[in-house]
Amino acid sequence: MIKSLLVTLIILILGTNAFAQNTFTISGTVRDQKNGLPGAGIYLSGYKIAAVADNDGKFRLPNLKPGSYDLLVQMVGYLPYSKSVIIADKSVQVDLVLKENTVQLNEVVIRADPNRQKYINQFKEFFIGKTPNATQCKILNPQVLNVDFDITNSTLTVTTTEFLVVENRALGYRLKYMLDHFEYNSRTHIIYYSGHPFFEELKASAARKKKYIAARETAYYGSSQHFFKSLYANTAQEEGFIINKMIKIPNPNRYPESVIQANLIKIKTLPEKTGVRKIAGKLDTGLYAFWIKQRDMPKTIDRFSRADVRTDTLVHDFDKNLKYLNYTDALLIQYTREKESLAYSNSGYWIFRPLDVPENEISIANLTEGRLRFYENGGIFDSRSLLYEGFWAYEKIADMVPMDYIPLSKK
């Protein structure tokens, strides 16, 4: 009996040590140029994990798995601060030095912009989204948004020097978002934003919490986070994903780029004897409009490929904490356990499909910059390497859950 107990104790101790070796700690000090800053808030971007600096400015974030993390620091009177930290096989110690927020310390003269509200409304649409969950989101401090519209490039940019606070009454989160950059081009309709979110739970009754949980489950399943997490675990097919390709082929209705550019130059610069008609010393506007229309036409058109993409040919090991994708054309991902809603179908993000393809949620992932690396939790290391179309482009901040979110049910 004693021998059996000893064996059991040894197994338990070994198991505990093995668990401890798989998790690590980020610790350090938050300070200004002189002293530690007690009371500074330290957040882990994309998670609900946080700490408060002690009287010496020291903090500790334990039980973290290997991976890439962004630390966010907030302190009244200082500019928000972020730092990337990579945990490989040991705990990490950091020194975080904050700078005073001179905007808060000095008097600021704000120039009135009659279009500011219009631009903020556009920002809300393209950052928070237009999903049913987005209707229950509210920006609590819109005054921190720095808005600019470049009429020459038709580009709206938005930045902040403080945390943007978004209250999501659909999912039950208060989101603190350090917005590094937001950009929307009204010509290309491409939206890009980057930043660091932190999730706080909203206080709610037991009945309300049940609604939050149900809404979070719906938001998580079929999302890009769910897809990449299942791809890492090699369970994408079992979890309801079908992977095909959207192949881009040359647009047969568009002249070659060289021909288009040559004709535009000729119309603008060459004299009348070239055969280009001019009226009263002016350009032939009809001919000019034709070539402008040709220039603005898409260079390629999409073709839905029926061939399934095998994950063992798509996913490769990068190191012990990262896997990567490297593919041609674009991935077309169907989530078979949720059908497209009417709200999505009317949103303008809808993806063409052959008539015999079911109305599953479809997203397209375009690879823009070489290979794409991703983590076990579904987080993307090279975030600017992907451009989404379809359902994942439709869902934005209003439908985001923390990176450590664990669903309660299986679909």
Image (cartoon, rainbow, N blue to C red):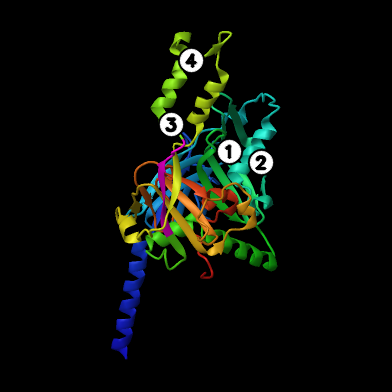
Tell me if residue 245 comes above or below residue 292 in the rendering.
below
Report the front residue among 310 and 411: 310
Circles 3 and 2: CB atoms closer than 8 Å: no
**Is the residue marked by circle 3 packed among few (<14), some (14-19), or many (20+) residues within 10 Å?**
some
Circles 1 and 2: CB atoms closer than 8 Å: yes
Q: CA distance from mark 4 to mark 1?
A: 56 Å
* Secondary structure category for the residue under label 2: loop
Q: CA distance from mark 1 to mark 3?
A: 48 Å
Q: Which mark is residue 276?
A: 4
**Is the residue marked by circle 2 packed among few (<14), some (14-19), or many (20+) residues within 10 Å?**
few
Circles 4 and 1: CB atoms closer than 8 Å: no
Q: Which mark is residue 162?
A: 1
Q: CA distance from mark 3 to mark 4?
A: 18 Å
Is 252 a magenta residue? yes
**Is the residue marked by circle 4 packed among few (<14), some (14-19), or many (20+) residues within 10 Å?**
some
Q: Is residue 112 left or right of residue 280?
A: right
Q: Which mark is residue 255?
A: 3
> What's the residue type where badge 2 is placed?
Asn
**Is the residue marked by circle 1 packed among few (<14), some (14-19), or many (20+) residues within 10 Å?**
many
User: In the image, which is nearer the foreground, mark 2 or mark 4?
Assistant: 4
* Secondary structure category for the residue under label 1: loop
Circles 2 and 4: CB atoms closer than 8 Å: no
> What's the residue type where badge 4 is placed?
Val
* Secondary structure category for the residue under label 3: loop
Q: CA distance from mark 2 to mark 4?
A: 57 Å
> What's the residue type where badge 3 is placed?
Tyr
Residue extent of the magenta highlight: 243-253
